[in-house]
Amino acid sequence: MRQSFAKVDKICRDKLIPLYGHIAVTSKCNLNCIHCYVTKQDEPELTTREVKSCLRQLSDLGTLFLAITGGELFTRKDIFDILACAKKNKFCITILTNGTLIDKNCIKFLKRYGIKAIGISLYGDNEKLHDKVTRVKGSFLNTMKAISMLNEEKITFYVKYVLMDCNWQSFRKVADSFKKDGTRLICSGNITPKEDRKKDPLKLTIKGANLRKFYMSNLDFAKKTEFIDLIKYSRDRDTSPANYICKAGRAEVFINPYGEVKPCIVFPSGYMGNIRRNSLKSIWLNEDPTLRWVRELKINSIPGCKDCKNLKYCIL
């Protein structure tokens, strides 16, 4: 199955089909997380009509997998309308949320439309630690309440534990707790610079020595999740160091709340264009020199990667 999908993935990258779409529908959020990369702008965010138009254009370009995020997407009053439109366009939808705004009405909608994947962010095993990261008192209790409701209603979801130097030691307690009720848990240590290129969030990244301790104390968790499979899949998929390093700008596209189009979420603004001025198709097929450089970037063009002894294990 993975090998078959790897072939589809490669075809899309070679033919510049944005198989993976990602749209952040708002920069607004009811939390204030210390590691957040979002940078608010003075421009108005995309309207309901503009978001729906973007979704249709993504569908026309061949996008199948769609991630809808924020900010916090449930701060938008029209979010159910947007999700319904995404479902109508037959995307395989993933939404990422902090879960604090999920209520009975939201649960009812999610059950009705069968959103493929719902990701809930978590930062600790207790209120003090989690709320220290979100900087909003009561956020841990509200997130756990959402997790409980999703479990009770048997809605498919997963919890994403964001690994930082301040919370890595609490992961084990979270993993053991969720193991009891069968809640799916994934772990990510991917902390990125802010959209305005400020690197403050990177200071929160788990340090090398602690990362080693974390992996060594959680090997059993890694073996029971997709992490090991991901490494094998990556190695099978990209056996040559000359291969492209990722899908950005080739099989993946990101649209921010202001209509700016980027190769992926971690790129700064200004790389491709804006759907308020041009169609998504014309932006995607643009032969801008900078975009061409991104699309042609390969592992063997990055100093230190080509001859790295760990290249075959790298999941870039």
Image (cartoon, grey):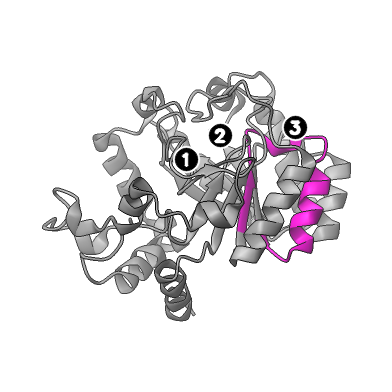
The magenta segment: 66-93
Q: Does the stretch in magenta take in 169? A: no
- Which mark is first along the chain, 2 or 1? 2
Residue 229, quarter of picture: bottom left
First in sequence, mark 3 or 2: give its number. 3
The residue at the point 55 percent across, 51 percent down is 185
Judging by the rendered image, the residue that carries numbered circle 3 is 75
> Counting other residues with Cα less than 10 Å from the Cα at mark 2, is it few (<14), some (14-19), or many (20 or more)?
many
* Secondary element at tag 2: loop
Q: Is residue 47 above or below residue 179?
A: above
* Disc 1: CA contacts within 10 A as few (<14), some (14-19) or many (>=20): many
Q: Which mark is residue 121?
A: none
Q: Which residue is mark 1?
A: 171
Q: Secondary structure at mark 3?
A: helix
Q: Position of residue 220 (x, y in %)?
A: 40, 57
What numbered label is drawn on residue 125? 2
